[in-house]
Image: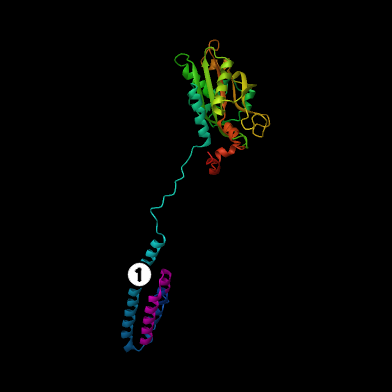
């Protein structure tokens, strides 16, 4: 037994010197010092020796086990140092190399277009007027010449709240009434404002319609304002947005809060008026609805329609972006897809 113990000791030391990885260290520990290792098994055989040999054998066996454990610790520490040095060498960084460029965020295409529209109207003397997203039915419909049961209300697929008569605005037009109330509070004053913001409609989401979208409303109220002022103003806006050679046409239309009303089109800048899929083969692209403020709406806003007149217009920034960039699906704007957003 004594000879076998010494043989195990020498073999274990030799094997320990031959290992070079942490995995091999674990395997060596399990083979010689583990619960089923050779040192554990030989110690269990101490009881088979003659009584007079047990003490000396047990003393030597424990001594060998401690020596092997100490040797294992030293070898393990040495291997860790070598592995760390190898890792540092293989993963060495060249600090003289240029760093990787950081990807910067960008403005949403709708935000870019809103800023451009605001910039143009600001140059034309219009101020930005902020209006609320959550509106009262009276401002969203009634004061805009759409009393209860008016058929035009069916065109506005409305989001209602649990509070009676409180809704999400379906257009930015209720801001017209609020602006007129503010400007007429201390005596009627001329108005020239735009009202940008988000609108909400309970519609089926398709390539051409969304439940939320931006609008930019415009309102000018003064004395002696005529339809010719409206036509000249929107034509100037179109030329500043699309280019100085932009051609504009006007089509009669209907809106409950303007009379007379008209749609404003520009000649398709993609096909030059020849007809293409973007303009639906007509050669023209609609950019806004507009009209002279209805006398009843002026009266509801606190202005005497016998003395004051005005015009209003409304446009959709997303629609303008789609027309300018041949985007065929409005859902791209709210899908948060970086492949789309990073193009702007």
Q: Range of the magenta residues? A: 1-27
Q: Where is residue 208 shown, x and y percent of the image? A: 62, 35
Q: Is residue 314 visible?
A: yes
Q: Residue furthest top?
A: 306
Which residue lies under the disc numbered 1?
78
Q: How many marks?
A: 1
Dominant secondary structure of the residues highlighted in magenta in the image: helix
Of residue 282 and residue 297, the one placed in the foreground of this image is 282
Q: Where is residue 304 shown, x and y percent of the image? A: 53, 12
- Residue at 33% across / 80% down in the picture? 64
Is residue 10 within the magenta segment? Answer: yes
Of residue 213 and residue 325, the one placed in the foreground of this image is 325
Q: Quadrant of residue 143?
A: top right
Q: Quadrant of residue 10?
A: bottom left
Is residue 94 within the magenta segment? Answer: no
Of residue 275 and residue 97, the one placed in the foreground of this image is 97
In the depicted structure, whether residue 248 falls above or below residue 94: above
Local SS, label 1: helix
- Residue at 37% across / 78% down in the picture? 13
- Which quadrant is the N terminus positioned in? bottom left
Q: Is residue 169 visible?
A: no
Q: Where is residue 206 shown, x and y percent of the image? A: 63, 37
- Residue at 55% across / 22% down in the picture? 236
Q: Where is residue 330 shown, x and y percent of the image? A: 59, 36
- Residue at 52% across / 19% down in the picture? 220
Does residue 99 appear left or right of residue 301 in this picture?
A: left
In the depicted structure, whether residue 61 falls above or below residue 271: below
């Amino acid at each position: 037994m004594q000879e076998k113990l010494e043989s195990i000791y020498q073999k274990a030391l030799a094997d320990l010197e031959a290992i070079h990885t942490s995995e091999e260290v674990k395997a060596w520990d399990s083979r010689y010092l583990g619960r089923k290792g050779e040192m554990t098994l030989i110690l269990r055989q101490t009881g088979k020796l003659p009584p007079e040999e047990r003490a000396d054998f047990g003393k030597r066996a424990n001594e060998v086990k401690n020596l092997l454990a100490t040797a294992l610790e030293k070898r393990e520490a040495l291997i860790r140092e070598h592995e760390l040095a190898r890792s540092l060498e293989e993963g060495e960084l060249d600090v003289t190399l240029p760093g990787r460029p950081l990807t910067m965020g960008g403005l949403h295409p709708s935000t870019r277009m809103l800023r451009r529209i605001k910039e143009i109207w600001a140059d034309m003397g219009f101020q930005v007027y902020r209006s609320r997203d959550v509106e009262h039915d009276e401002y969203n419909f009634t004061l805009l010449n759409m009393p209860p049961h008016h058929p035009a209300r069916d065109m506005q697929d409305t989001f209602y709240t649990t509070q009676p008569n409180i809704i999400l605005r379906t257009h930015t037009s209720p801001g017209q009434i609020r602006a007129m109330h503010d400007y007429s509070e201390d005596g009627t004053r001329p108005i020239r404002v735009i009202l940008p913001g988000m609108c909400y409609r309970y519609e089926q989401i398709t390539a051409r319609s969304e439940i939320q979208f931006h609008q930019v409303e415009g309102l000018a109220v003064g004395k002696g304002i005529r339809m010719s002022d409206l036509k000249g103003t929107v034509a100037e806006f179109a030329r500043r947005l699309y280019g100085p050679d932009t051609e504009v046409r006007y089509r009669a239309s209907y809106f409950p809060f303007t009379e007379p009303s008209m749609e404003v089109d520009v000649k398709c800048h993609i096909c030059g008026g020849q007809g293409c899929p973007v303009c639906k083969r007509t050669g023209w692209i609609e950019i806004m609805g507009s009209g002279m403020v209805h006398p009843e709406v002026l009266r509801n806003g606190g202005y005497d329609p016998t003395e004051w007149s005005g015009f209003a217009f409304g446009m959709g920034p997303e629609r303008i972006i789609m027309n300018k960039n041949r985007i065929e699906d409005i859902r791209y704007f709210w899908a948060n897809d970086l492949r789309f957003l990073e193009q702007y």
